Image (tube, rainbow, N blue to C red):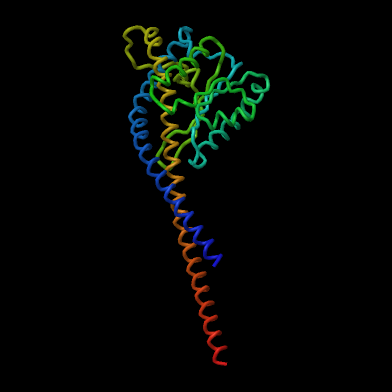
Amino acid sequence: MSNLKEVRTRIASVKSTKQITSAMKMVAASKLRKAQNAILQLRPYVNKLQEILQSISASLESSGENIYSRQNEVNNVLLVVLTSNRGLCGAFNSNVIKVTTRQIEANYASYLKAGRLNLITIGKHASEYFKKHNYPVVERYDDIYDSLTFDNVVPIAEKVMNEYAEGKYDHVEIIYNQFKNAAVQQLLIEQYLPVKSDVDLEFGEVFIDYIFEPSKEEIVNELIPKSLKLQLFKALLDSYASEQGARMTAMHLATDNATELLKELKVSYNKARQASITNEILEIVSGAEALKG
């Protein structure tokens, strides 16, 4: 009977777990729908703006007017790492952390040792991991996901842009998960600053097919900062949508595993119950036979 009681307890526990994972899957699916709509609507606009931005930056490289595309010697590096605040989303957070540590080890180990590498973390998982392992985290913005709006992202982007313009950093990268679909996220290491420019390598000339009004310099002062702010906002929306997709997938798999485990436990329970009934019948028959004798 003790075995039956243990199996019944496990069945009740797995049923409870299945209800939780199923509910979390539905919540993640609801959040994913909103996040997916937001990133899919923003992405074409940002991509086109970046295309124009790169063209303008390339055309102004020689004039030195564009501070955001200047190619200085890289002495100080900043990595902006995006994870989530919550877990239960599979390998979503651990993959970002692994890629970041590999990037540092492969390309910026000497910068780290010399104190010329800094990190800005967005999301508690990255903040806690890199703080625990004594990485130079200069800023953390874990509360941004509580209200992920463009206006709330702007101060972060402006801080990075200002420090780059002042020469505090010569190279800035963003590391995050780009949203593909509910089941697929692509880890990206994206150069944020300096702005990349489109140059024809064969002829060494910049090809621009735009008529500028007002002047290019005025457009740079307005368009490039706006584009950089949008680029960071897009990365955060990508990361948030990827998080919800990863969580929905993880909870879907957990629910399926709980369903399979319940089937196995019910089979075990029925076998144990049949064995218990058989033993009771044997005891009754044995007692009856003993009375006859």
Q: Residue drawn 49% across and 66% down?
A: 269
Name the image quarter holding the N terminus.
bottom right
Q: In the picture, which quadrant includes the C terminus?
A: bottom right
Q: In the image, residue 131 lies at what x, y percent?
A: 60, 27
Query: What x and y, as percent, mark residue 143?
Result: 47, 26
In the rendered image, the vertical position of residue 13 relative to residue 123, given as above or below: below
Picture layout, residue 27 above or below residue 76: below
In the rendered image, the residue lying farthest to the bottom is 293
How many marks overall?
A: 0
Above or below, 3 against 141 in this view is below
Question: Looking at the image, can residue 159 be seen?
Answer: yes
Left or right of 33 in this view: 127: right
Q: Residue at x 48, y 58 (%)?
A: 11
Q: Position of residue 281 (x, y in %)?
A: 51, 80
- Compare residues 36 and 49 and report the one nearer the observer: 36
Taking the image as drawn, is residue 54 in sight? Answer: no
Q: Relative to the observer, which residue lies in front, 201 or 172? A: 172
Res 279 quadrant in image: bottom right
- Residue sitting at x 37%, y 30%: 39
Give residue 186's position: percent from left, percent from top: 47, 36
Depth check, front residue: 168 or 292: 292
Q: Quadrant of residue 199?
A: top left
Q: Residue furthest front?
A: 291
